[in-house]
Amino acid sequence: MKSELRTHLPLSGDTAFLLARANARSLAAAHDALGAHGLRVRSYSVLALAAAEARLSQRDIAEYLWLDPSQVVSLVDDLQQRGLVTREPDENDRRAKVVVATDEGRRLHRAAARAVREREQETLEPLDETDRDRLRELLMRLAFPL
Amino acid sequence: MKSELRTHLPLSGDTAFLLARANARSLAAAHDALGAHGLRVRSYSVLALAAAEARLSQRDIAEYLWLDPSQVVSLVDDLQQRGLVTREPDENDRRAKVVVATDEGRRLHRAAARAVREREQETLEPLDETDRDRLRELLMRLAFPL
DNA sequence: TATTGTTATACTCTATAACTATA
DNA sequence: TATAGTTATAGAGTATAACAATA
């Protein structure tokens, strides 16, 4: 990078810019780690929610991942065709469909999650353990306000 | 959000996920603030670099914003057609083109930057001043490692 | 009437390769 | 041979509106 930039970084006053750039590095690493498992960031995220205990509907998943419900349809379609998740009827609401990971989906999720965590260490390398915890805590409050 | 989710948040162990979700909120706010000024996040970012002192080439801009050089072409095309930036020849390298903001471009940038900063306060509302500084410092190290 | 999942469509963003002019 | 800018293209992501089944 140009030396003038190093000394006076444009946009660095905008937290939004720093977030975006840090996120770009992080996303690239995650995408890279997931490729070997046949997943992308978004399909991995949906699979992770399907593997959770909460028995989430497609609507829940859309809200949690900040996706449009129509996007969740095709993501679940894909995972279902690969035998990684199933759509189960919600007993309390016949409109809703609960997305649940199959055994194979759970196995893949565990392996992929491990890969993501390992690769994440590189992105987080500039921070020591204390700073990583601090960052997670701050991001948590931004990501889930209230 | 479902109450089970509030107590045990899936994916919250992945810093990448927290970054992505915080960034999604932040991006939406910035996009919203910029709309009134006829800018998007990416065109605003390019304009901000053109308004900086460093006299950056398109290549510099691409690297700084994590964009492909070919994307910068059309972003600069658009800003140039609107009279907000000009392409100036680099005296030291006749291949390169320096992107410089016009007076009108500088005015728009100042107004847009103000709007982004104001709107950003809402996103950062869960954090007090000390935490905001801490977050910026941590993100800076992730965004610009070395 | 409102909500869930779905389909369809258009638009933006991303990734890649090739070309030209310069270095 | 390598780099800066450009063009072209395909694929992924995003935003919106409409519809059927159900609440």
Image (cartoon, coloured by chain):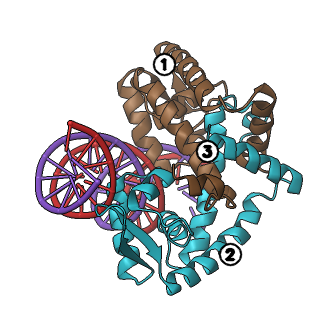
Chain colours: A cyan, B brown, C red, D purple
Chain designation of label 2: A
Asked if badge 1 and badge 2 are on a common chain, one would say no
Q: x%, y% of residue A108? A: 56, 81
Q: Which mark is residue A146?
A: none
Residue indicated by mark 3? A143
In the image, residue A43 above or below residue A143: below
Question: From where the camera sits, is residue B85 visible?
Answer: yes
In the image, residue B24 above or below residue D9: above
The answer to which of A69 and B73 lies nearer the viewer is A69
The answer to which of A30 and C5 lies nearer the viewer is C5
Q: Residues within 10 Å of mark 2 (few under 14, many from 20)?
A: some
State which quadrant residue A98 falls in: bottom left
Asked which secondary structure carries label 1, the reply is helix
Asked which secondary structure carries label 2, the reply is helix
Residue indicated by mark 2? A114
Picture residue at 37% right of the left edge, 78% below the top: A80
Residue indicated by mark 1? B105
The answer to which of B86 and C9 lies nearer the viewer is C9
Tell me which amino acid carries mark 2.
Arg
The answer to which of A8 and A51 lies nearer the viewer is A51
Q: x%, y% of residue A99? A: 42, 70
